[in-house]
Image (cartoon, rainbow, N blue to C red):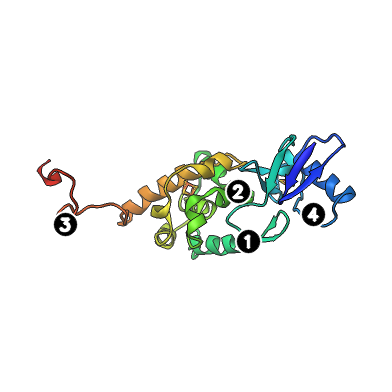
Amino acid sequence: MRLTIANKQYTLEKKVDTLLEALIDIKKYQDNSLTFKSGCRSGVCGSCAVVVNGTERLACITKVSNDDIVEPLRNLPVITSLVTTNNHIGNLLNKAQNNIGNINNDNITKADEEKIDKVSSCILCSSCYSSCPVYSVNSDFIGPFALTRAYRYIEDKKLEQPKTIIDNIQKNGVFSCTLCGNCNMVCPEQIDIKGAIMQLRNKSVQYGYSNPNLITDFGGGLDFGFNPNQF
Ligand code: SF4
Ligand code: SF4
Ligand code: FES
């Protein structure tokens, strides 16, 4: 089996199932300089995310095939081979959930719990940031996972002051997302990230914010070929 890993070509004679097994074998018997991350080896810890043939995947649960091209996650600083650092995403996460506020004594129901269960299941693999076209051109964009985490706290009934979080996610936040859905497609936990961002937009409007990208003043300068104010 031929593989291209971080721009190097390898041939693997041994039969392996997963990409992680292939990486481990190549490191052990062919190239000790090949570097990658792994932990649980069962799709739980999120540490082994890489890009395979252009799509973000967890190496430990991805079947390896002949001629696969394996690259490090995109949009993140590469340390070596397939190892990237997501320190910057940690900062964005802190920015989004800064000042979580006081916790109240309200009882929460099973339904309340279920509402935030799925969005809490992120394994911090960073695949969503790797696939995000906005983050690729704006590293200040708060981005998919951090916004999803903001949504998780805003929907948590035990949180007294969700407005602080709403305030935190306006600049380079909810309205900067193009709603392309790439993040949903690559998330190994099948979290509806785009849906959470849309919910955050609705919440933002409820708190008096509006989409700064929308044209609301038809009076100035733009030629639509008709007068929109007549409708
Ligand atoms: S939906 Fe938004 S956050 Fe998700 S990848 Fe697209 S631009 Fe990025
Ligand atoms: S939201 Fe999904 S893709 Fe993004 S870091 Fe969490 S598990 Fe990974
Ligand atoms: S090694 Fe933990 S998710 Fe792959």
Residue 201 drawn at (x, y percent): 38, 50
- Residue 187 tag number: none
Residue highlighted by disc 1: 77
Amino acid at the residue labelled 4: Leu
Q: Measuring 67% from the left and 48% from the top, which residue is drawn there?
A: 50
Q: Which residue is mark 3?
A: 220
Separation of residues labelled 3 and 4 (CA atoms): 58 Å
The numbered mark, 4 or 1, whose residue comes first in the sequence reads: 4
Q: Which residue is mark 2?
A: 127
Residue 55 sits above or below residue 105 on the image: above
Q: Amino acid at mark 2?
A: Ser
Closest to the camera, between mark 1 and mark 2, is: 1
Q: Which mark is residue 34?
A: 4
- Residue 110 placement (x, y as % from top left): 53, 39
| Front-lying residue, 140 or 11 | 11
Is disc 1 in contact with disc 2, using a CB cutoff of under 8 Å? Answer: no
Drawn side of residue 194 relative to residue 45, left or right? left
Question: Of the residues under marks 1 and 2, which one precedes in the sequence?
Answer: 1
Q: Is mark 4 within 8 Å of ligand 3?
A: no
Please tell me whether mark 1 sits on a helix, a strand or a loop: loop
Callouts 4 and 1 close, C-beta under 8 Å: no
Inspect the image, locate mark 3, and give the three-letter code of the amino acid beneath it.
Gly
Is ligand 2 closer than 8 angstroms to the Cβ of mark 2?
A: yes
Q: CA distance from mark 3 to mark 1?
A: 43 Å
Whether residue 100 is visible, yes or no, is no
Q: Secondary structure under badge 3?
A: loop
| Cα distance in 3D space between marks 1 and 2 | 14 Å
* Label 3 lies in ligand 1 vicinity (Cβ under 8 Å): no
Sequence-wise, the earlier of marks 3 and 4 is 4
The quarter of the picture where the N terminus appears is top right
Residue 26 placement (x, y as % from top left): 84, 47
